Amino acid sequence: MQTKGIVLAGGTGSRLFPATLGLSKQLLHVYDKPMIYYPLATLMSAGIRDFCVIVNKIEVEMFKKLLGDGSQWGIKIEFQIQESPEGIPQAFIIAEAFLDGDNAALILGDNLFIGHGLGRSLSEVTTPNGAHIFLYEVEHPENYGVPIFDNNKRILMLTEKPEKPEHNLAIPGLYFFDDSVSDRARNLKKSKRGEYEIVDLLQSYAIEHRLTYTELSRGTAWLDTGSPEDLFNAGEFVRVIQQRQGSFIACLEEIAYRNGWISLDVLTEQQKRMEKSPYGNYLQRIITRSAGK
């Protein structure tokens, strides 16, 4: 049984209006590349090659123009339409046929995870016996979903935006599930907000003691891009890291080539498409180093 990736990139991006009145938030750039490159890069680094990108019907053609079928990166991409956003678990209902009984990794299209060795860590949990989440220390956990632990540090239950959280660990938008996730999503009831809640889906695993977690290390950055300030800060973070380290974050061609999914010839074709940009220059550096081996 393999693990397939779902990138949830629907929604209106209303907190970014007017920037997102005519363009999906996930098509906006985070410094030098489209936002959706970052969640794709995260799951590709974990070894996932089969993707469903969930978008709204107005912008699906723009996503197809940008991403194609994924073959240029040695992956497969299909698109599904989200008619109206009704909560994160809805993704598993929309993508049920795509999953076809396989495990699922879901990442929110506006969540960026950046850190050395992150892909290797994620690859260790791509086949969970239940569900697996990640925890990240934040300054204001009351703005997020938060777990409550028992005396053995197992997750007892989860709360959404608690008024008085017991700790500073929040749940970012990256989840791994077994093959029962679509059935569980279908059995959820909408909350008072009129949505299916991810904490309710996770709770269905927690009560069976089948919800595990990993605390992301301090060397990993989790960046939300929900507000204009968050979006700007994420771009600045990427800019500084790339300029100081000399390597690009979320370079899909590099990930695909390092994973052995595309050949040097395919990498060269991609470089020629973008040779006038800094991104294209970076791909040329990879080609030059590879040719010199």
Image: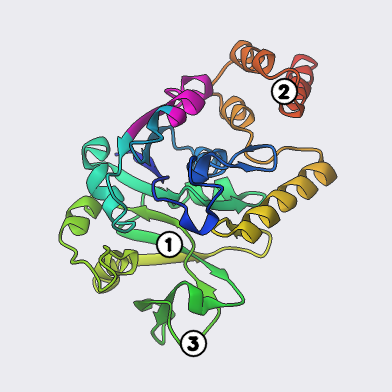
Amino acid on which disc 2 is placed: Gly
* Quarter-of-image position of residue 7: top left
Residue linked to disc 1: 133
Whether 63 is among the magenta residues is yes
- Residue placed at 39% from the left, 60% from the top? 132
- Give the residue pinned by disc 2: 280
Q: Secondary structure at mark 3?
A: loop
Q: Which residue is mark 3?
A: 166
Location of residue 284 in the rendering, given as x and y in whole percent from the top left corner = 75, 20
In the image, is residue 278 above or below residue 90? above
Tell me if residue 293 comes above or below residue 41 in the rendering.
Answer: above
Quarter of the rendering containing residue 185: bottom left
Can residue 221 be seen?
Answer: no
User: Alpha carbon of mark 1 to alpha carbon of mark 2: how far?
Assistant: 35 Å
Where is residue 194 shown, x and y percent of the image?
A: 25, 66
Q: Nearer the viewer, mark 1 or mark 2?
A: 2
- Alpha-carbon span between mark 3 and mark 2: 47 Å
**Label 2, residues with CA under 10 Å away: few <14, some 14-19, many ≥20:** some
The span from disc 3 to disc 1 (Cα, nearest Å) is: 18 Å
Of the 4 image quadrants, the one containing the N terminus is top left
- The part of the chain drawn in magenta is 62-79
Task: Of the two numbered discs 3 and 1 on the same chain, state the one appearing first in sequence.
Answer: 1
Which picture quadrant has residue 48? top left
- Quadrant position of the C terminus in the picture: top right
Residue 193 versus residue 292 in the image, above or below: below
Element marked by disc 1: strand
Front disc: 3 or 1 = 3
Q: Is residue 181 magenta?
A: no
Element class at badge 2: helix
